[in-house]
Image: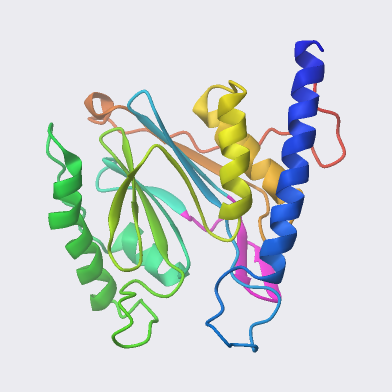
Amino acid sequence: MNATEGRKALVGSLTSQARLQARNLWLDDGSRAPGDTKQEGRGTMTLIVGIEKKARVTMGADSACGWREEVFTDPHGAKIALCGGGRYLIGSCGSARVAQVLQHLTEWPEPPPSGDLLPFLIREVAPEVLRSVKAASAAYAEPNDGLHLGKNTVVLIGVRGELYSLSSDLTVMRQSSACIGFGRTAGNPVMEALEKAGIEPARKRVEMTLEIVARHTPLVAPPFRILELPPAESVLSPRARPSHSTMPPVGASIP
């Protein structure tokens, strides 16, 4: 099998995995409470993909919006954005209002120039996120359930070339790569397989993961937005490169 045939076989295998995972998620996306039969069928949507590679964070997001049967695409909705003067790259799923607060109201603290970032994120970033979300009354969660950012909200944070996740209970975790949103269960194995197959650069893996999952569920949809946070030493004049996917349309052959 030559390289071209091998790549076609890989993509075929990945699309089969994505189709199965998307079908399972369509039936039960994990957003139902135990015993809740009122939310049968469709649930939340979105797929946000993040990768840390060589002190650079790459993040991509789809354009699907809405809830359950109310599905539409919003190519202007920013699920990912540079924040804090370009020192942070933020992506969030769940509440669109929380995303707006994170991008426009949160006062992102200046990250330390060196050292372990995890204590800084736990001590300073997570409380600031909570403060701004509470001040804007943006989170919808039951009292005392511990989900401070809302039931389905998860945040990916790129800072100083490193990738972290912030869950709704404010737990901060270091990630080398991560998928959040409806398509995460389909996206994670696809992204892992692409890495094992040597698909580079990270930007290409992000793009292919979004495209493959989107082919098999209407709850993940193009156009895709991809941003990159450069290494910390180059953030003095922050730049990100938004783009739309250049992957072939559904049914097109992949060389």
- Say if 228 sits above or below 79 in the image: above
Residue 255 appears in the rendering: yes
Q: Residue at x 25, y 77 (%)?
A: 134
Left or right of 119, for residue 79:
right
In this view of the protein, which residue sits in the foreground, 143 or 58?
143
**Residue 21 position in % (x across, y down):** 69, 54
Question: Does 78 appear in magenta?
Answer: yes
Left or right of 187, for residue 238:
left
**Residue 220 position in % (x across, y down):** 66, 56
Residue 248 appears in the rendering: no
- Say if 133 sits above or below 239 in the image: below
Q: Which residue is drawn at 64% across and 89% down?
A: 38
**Residue 126 position in % (x across, y down):** 22, 60
How many labels, in total?
Answer: 0
Q: In which quarter of the image is the N terminus?
A: top right
- Say if 105 sits above or below 32 in the image: above
Q: Residue at x 24, y 29 (%)?
A: 232
In this view of the protein, which residue sits in the foreground, 199 or 104?
199
Q: Quadrant of residue 251?
A: top right
**Residue 172 position in % (x across, y down):** 28, 54
- Say if 77 sits above or below 31 in the image: above
Q: Quadrant of residue 105?
A: bottom left
Residue stretch in magenta: 62-79
Q: Residue at x 12, y 33 (%)?
A: 115
Question: Does 75 appear in magenta?
Answer: yes
